[in-house]
Image (cartoon, rainbow, N blue to C red):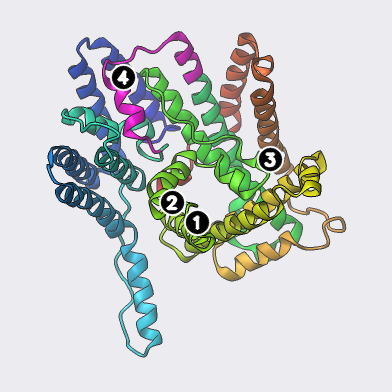
Amino acid sequence: MIFASKAFLVFLPVVLVLYFALRTRSHKYRVLLAASWFFYAWLSPQYLWVIILCTLIDYAAAIKIEAAESNRARKRWLAFSIVANLGLLAAFKYAMFAYDNAVSLSNLCGFEVRDRHWSILLPLGISFHTFQGISYTVDVYRRQIKAVRSFVDYALFVSFFPQLAAGPIVRAAEFLPQMHTPPTPSAKQIADGLHLFVLGLFKKLFIADQLDVLFVSPVFADPGAFGPAAHRWAAVAWVAQIYCDFSGYSDMAVGVAKWFGFELPRNFNLPYLATSITDFWRRWHLSLSTWLRDYVYFPLGGSKGSAARTYFNLMTVFVLCGLWHGATWPWLVYGAYNGLLMCLHRVWDRALTGVPWADVVRGSWAWAALTWFATLAQVTAGLVLIRMKSWPDGGLMLKSLVAFDVWGERAAGVPVWVPLLVLLVAVGHVCGGLSAKFGSRWELPSPVRAAGYVAAVLALVTLTPGVTRTFIYIQF
């Protein structure tokens, strides 16, 4: 059951009716928890025990941490929580990767080891709910929040179904205070929730899935059958697709949560308007970026030590970021690639900041346009790494990105819909940037928004084949 499925469009109204028909806090939250576990079991029934086990471990560990009299005991219970969460994550997500590389290394050294003939299905949302559990016990250890005494409350925080499958990663300090009294959604929350849900559905079905079917998958499956211009368009279309797919899910998650009266954190902030790689990671997958900052980068020392230590911390964070996304060499290289770019940008920025002529140049519109283009090119090259079928195919795609025949070659074989859908993403970013800069003057009137919802629904019904592909980040 995913947000764009018919089953979910039946499931959601039933849960909403039951939730608001009940009067007591305990009954409301028990029903919502049962619905969340049902949502989980629908997609990953054999692994329901995983999320329940993680929930029990972190619930008990946090109480023990808070009750412990010695710092040593507190650290022991915190370590138990972290090891349990990361151990389950490693067992399900990284065991196959580790085994395959061990086999390759053994064969290279002359020892014959059988290839893997087994596989492990990844439990739903394990990368997200394990990070939520770790952040919770760490925050209790740091005495930033109190341990939750109600198991139902804590279990609902972990498994709240709108964000369960693919985030955003929610902190206990953000969600638990909202649970003191079951929130009643305001008229604005209901309207905003509708806006976000329809917007996310439109991004997913009309843009992301269409780009994938029309062009991205065929080109990336066999780059040799296409020319450099098609490669470039496929790379750009993939950049648009992954944004619309993931931000579409986040929009829908935040929108559904609003209908229950809950506010979830924003996960994207117009990332393709970024003018540096640092700016990009402050806009893309915000819940993960800030999680890694607060629970990995800062504990490692952040930027308080020597320059070498700071660069080591940055590389560590982004290598872990790559591995968090996927247990493959392309994801590992993607993390290292972004870590290297972050380090280089820090060197560049520190060298030019305070230099009079450089400050003048960096404040100009021409410089902003140049850095925007350079950042988008860096992001595109990185995303090609995680979409390629093989290293030779990826090399061919990357070579086309820097080809010098941009003006001489026609984009043969590129469907007309591809540039139009990419343009929609660009227009959305521009309108979002103008709205952020000028405020409510750029907010559309209610009748126009209503007409937009109707047009979006009609486009989804008439121009898309329905649900054909799951959300990309559910696979992580």
Secondary structure of the residue carrying tag 4 is helix
Q: Residue at x 47, y 34 (%)?
A: 250
Q: Give the magenta-colored segment's residue range.
A: 169-193
Q: Residue at x 30, y 54 (%)?
A: 89
Q: Which mark is residue 130?
A: none
Image position of 102 with respect to 320: above or below:
below
Which residue occupies 34% across, 76% down?
A: 102
Q: Residues within 10 Å of mark 3 (few under 14, many from 20)?
A: many
Depicted 307 relative to depicted 195: above or below: below
Q: Residues within 10 Å of mark 1 (few under 14, many from 20)?
A: many
Quick one: label 4 or label 2, which is nearer the N terminus? 4
What residue type is disc 1 on? Leu
Mark 1 / mark 2, whichever is N-terminal: 2
Q: What's the distance in space between the residues labelled 3 and 4, CA to CA?
A: 36 Å
What label sits on residue 14 in the rendered view? 4
- Per the image, is 29 magenta? no
- Name the residue carrying label 3: 422
Q: Are marks 1 and 4 in contact (CB under 8 Å)?
A: no
Instruction: Name the residue beneath numbered marker 1.
Output: 314
Q: On screen, 138 above or below 256?
A: below
- Alpha carbons under labels 1 and 3: distance apart: 32 Å
Residue, disc 2: 297
Q: At label 4, which amino acid type do we have?
A: Val
Q: Secondary structure at mark 2?
A: helix
Tell me the CA gap for discs 2 and 3: 34 Å
Label 4 to label 2: alpha-carbon separation? 42 Å
- Of tags 1 and 3, the one toward the viewer is 1
Mark toward the start of the polypeptide (1 vs 4): 4
The answer to whether residue 465 of the structure is visible from this angle is no
Q: Is residue 423 above or below residue 438?
A: below
- Amino acid at pointer 2: Tyr
